[in-house]
Image (cartoon, grey):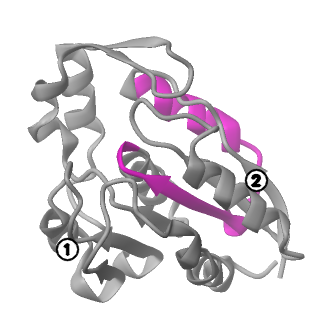
Amino acid sequence: MSGLTLLYLHGFLSSPASEKACQTRRYAESLDQLDEILVPELKSGPVETVAQLLDLVAGRDTGALGLIGSSLGGFYATVLAERLQVPAVLINPAVHPAQYWQGYLGEHRNFHSGEIHEVTRAHIEQLEALDPPTIASPEKYLVFLQRHDEVLDYRQALRRYGDAQCLLRDDGDHAYAGFDRELPAAFDFLLQSISPN
């Protein structure tokens, strides 16, 4: 079996410097089975972001590609997983974000860089157009949810991905408290899911 190429996708207004991204990078780099970890700074527009990610993985062996996505990054991971049929681990993922993204219209400051991002109505339309209508292969997902997520309703993810694919923790928050404790299970899932050469 070839090693894993991991693509980690951060959430809205986050960055590759986020705590979960750094925890993931450190854990991944400790594994012999890891070939490469990619933690890009995501573009601000949904169509731009998906194009950026498809360009990033172009030419790589998708049979050895795994995704981890948090919040809005979980939505993008779902878009890529459905298009490329690769496994994905999702952390408190945004489900059908176009349905509630109008509440984010306007300017927002990135938590890490201070850069200003503007959410427009065109972005909402793009999210809606990108959203896969169904999940073709639920077994390709492992979804970590925390019941006390103060931003997103975990029940949407349970309906979207199915109870069998979701690990629901009773405590926590949107940032997913104690995420580092889930990393062994996340990587076991991805490594078991990638295709042999």
Residue on which disc 2 sits:
37
Q: Is residue 185 above or below residue 152?
A: below
- Range of the magenta residues? 47-72
Left or right relative to 130: residue 8:
right
Q: Quadrant of the C terminus?
A: bottom right
**Quarter of image, res 119:** top left
**Quarter of image, res 161:** bottom left
Q: Position of residue 9 (x, y in %)?
A: 54, 46
Mark identifier at residue 158 = 1
Q: How many marks?
A: 2
Q: Position of residue 70 (x, y in %)?
A: 44, 53
Residue at 40%, 53% in the rendered image: 74
Residue at 23%, 80% in the rendered image: 162
Are the residues tagged 1 and 2 within 8 Å (C-beta)? Answer: no
* Distance of label 1 from label 2 (alpha carbons): 28 Å
Residue at 43%, 46% in the rendered image: 73
